[in-house]
Image (cartoon, rainbow, N blue to C red):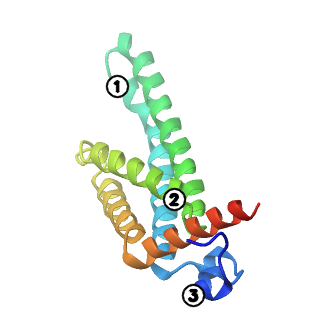
Amino acid sequence: MTDHLRSDDFDDTEFSGEPALLAAPWPTKAAFWLWLTEALIAIINGVLVLSYGPTLAAGIDPSLASTTTGITIAVGVLLIVVALFRALCAFSVLRGRTWAKYTLTILGVIGVGSALTQVTTAPGTTIASVLVTIAAIVFMYLPDSNAYFRRISEERLAAKARG
């Protein structure tokens, strides 16, 4: 490997200086939009938990109502915060950041695993979230996306080596 990259090392548009949304290959763009869609679904789920969780808690044993209300509020806020973090990671995926790809993969696998336990409580949004998450993960690992991440990493390493 040379100390620096030549302009002819990258024939694709990913390295033409275009914005990431234009430069990224289509599977990476698809993963980006799917992650944003999944984050939106998760935010909606969080809002629903915040809206209806305390109402549902009111119908249970009064001694457990305040604890259940606190837990549902915490879960709703956590869903929204994690969804916003995934949306931020999606922008980094679009820029070819490998750490974001792996972070979203881990969060996606955890999310799919936990969503499968919730299918009976919110089947529509849960199934949609699982399908979108699986598709987003798959798109991040297609050959064009892998090549994009690899090339971006090599370009960053070469830029660091140049100083």
Q: CA distance from mark 2 to mark 3?
A: 19 Å
What kind of residue is marked 2? Thr
Q: Is residue 36 above or below residue 9?
A: above
In this view, the residue in front, 93 or 51, is 93
Extreme residue toward the front, this view: 2
Q: Earlier in the sequence, mark 1 or mark 3?
A: 3
Q: Residue at x 67, y 85 (%)?
A: 7
Image quarter where the N terminus lies is: bottom right
- Can you tell which of label 1 and label 3 is closer to the viewer? 3
Query: Where does the image place residue 8, in percent across and percent down from the top left?
Result: 63, 89
Residue that carries the numbered disc 2 in the rendered image: 98
Question: Is 24 above or below relative to 86?
Answer: below
Q: Is residue 117 left or right of residue 100?
A: left
Which residue is denoted by mark 1 in the rendering?
Answer: 59
On the image, the x and y values in percent for residue 153 come to 56, 65
Q: Residue at x 51, y 44 (%)?
A: 82
Q: Which residue is mark 3?
A: 12
